[in-house]
Image (cartoon, grey):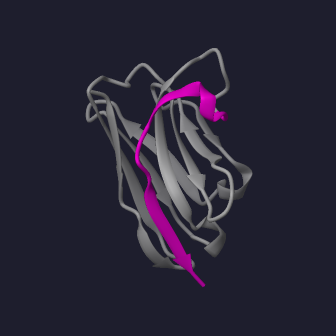
Amino acid sequence: QVQLVESGGGLVQAGGSLRLSCAASGRTFSSDAMGWFRQPPGKEREFVAAVSWNGDRLYYTNSVKGRFTISRDNAKNTMYLQMNSLKPEDTAVYYCAGGYSSASSVYTERSYRYWGQGTQVTVSS
């Protein structure tokens, strides 16, 4: 059974930092791109960041560039999202995604087959 499990979410003040982790089990994702998405309260889920299979290509939505860093450790089958200088508008449920299909863009949800259950990130002002 393939599972993606996020951890590291929580409540933080504006300007603070959090590090999210996504641990995969059931299959290896070392040959696939992986991504982070988020769903703010009352809004649609949106792309945050993605990383190529070997970590040499990184993709970010404009609003997090310079503040968030995506990375992965294929030996541990784990992906990370380091979030610095957090803002209240970063408040959302954050989801990791795997099983990427190269037929579609890394920016779109339908490109990914597997999803975690989500972890809540709340940034207070």
* Span of residues in magenta: 107-125
Residue 1 found in image quarter: top left
Q: Position of residue 40 (x, y in %)?
A: 62, 61
x and y percentages locating residue 8 in the rendered image: 36, 60
Q: Can you name the residue that lies furthest to the front here?
A: 42
Q: Residue at x 56, y 19 (%)?
A: 101
21 and 70: which one is in front?
21
Q: Position of residue 98 (x, y in %)?
A: 46, 31
Where does residue 54 sit, x and y in percent of width and height?
45, 26
The one of 15 and 36 positioned closer to us in this rendering: 36
Residue at the extreme right: 62
Which quarter of the rendering shows the C terminus? bottom right
- The residue at 29%/23% (across/down) is 27
In the image, residue 29 lies in the stretch drawn in magenta: no
| Residue under the image location 44 percent in, 52 percent down | 118
Judged from this view, the residue extending furthest toward the top is 103
Instruction: Please give left or right for residue 62 compared with residue 16 in the image.
Output: right
Task: Give the number of callouts.
Answer: 0
Please state if 110 lies on the left or on the right of 121 as rendered. Answer: right
Q: Is residue 42 above or below residue 48?
A: below
Residue at the outermost bottom position: 125
* Residue 122 shown in magenta: yes
**Residue pictured at 63% horizontal, 49% vertical:** 45
